[in-house]
Image: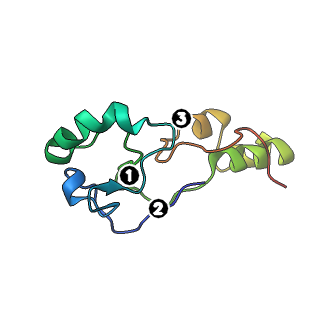
Amino acid sequence: MSVLIKGMRMPENCIKCPMQFGGMCYVMPAEVDESRVAPTVEAAWKQGKPDWCPLVEIPVHGRLIDGDALQCKVDDIGLGYFAVYGVTEDTIDSAPTVIEAEGSENECLR
């Protein structure tokens, strides 16, 4: 599961990031070997976001819905009902992804 901090802008570099304090990054993934990135951290602090940084910028968007849940509803009720309103499987599949799915995809939550 992830956390969205509304109104937070993507920091230009680690120095300006609110997820660090006193040179410690509090969102560094556990699998990142600190000794491996230590030589590059100083440069990253000044130059920009390191490649291991988990922060993701979310583009300006409209209302977000769960396309997988909509597909499950279409599967349950049948496409004919939704086709009346212009919803097709292609419409759902081609909708832009703003935030990538987490967890198991294609599992209908009941």
Q: Secondary structure at mark 3?
A: loop
Which image quadrant for residue 19? Answer: bottom left
Q: Is residue 51 visible?
A: no
Q: Which residue is mark 3?
A: 94
Observer-side mark, 1 or 3, equals 1
Instruction: Please provide percent x and percent y for residue 23.
Output: 27, 56
Residue 23 versus residue 50 in the image, above or below: below
Q: Please name the residue shown 80% across and 46% down the image.
A: 108
Q: Nearer the viewer, residue 72 or 80?
A: 72
Q: Callout 3: 10 Å neighbours few (<14), some, many (20+)?
A: few
Mark sitting earlier along the chain (1/3): 1
* Amino acid type at mark 1: Ile
Q: Secondary structure at mark 1?
A: loop
Q: Which quadrant, please, contains the N terminus?
A: bottom right
Residue 6 versus residue 71 in the image, above or below: below
Q: Please name the residue shown 35% across and 51% down the image.
A: 59
Residues at marks 2 and 1, CA–CA distance in whole angstroms: 9 Å
Mark sitting earlier along the chain (2/1): 2
The answer to whether mark 2 and mark 1 are in CB contact below 8 A is: yes
The circle drawn on residue 107 is none
Q: Callout 2: 10 Å neighbours few (<14), some, many (20+)?
A: few
Q: Is residue 67 visible?
A: yes
Q: Which residue is mark 1?
A: 58
Q: Nearer the viewer, residue 108 or 72?
A: 108
The answer to whether mark 2 and mark 3 are in CB contact below 8 A is: no
Residues at marks 1 and 3, CA–CA distance in whole angstroms: 19 Å
Mark sitting earlier along the chain (2/3): 2
* Amino acid type at mark 2: Leu
Observer-side mark, 2 or 3, equals 2
Q: Which residue is mark 2?
A: 4
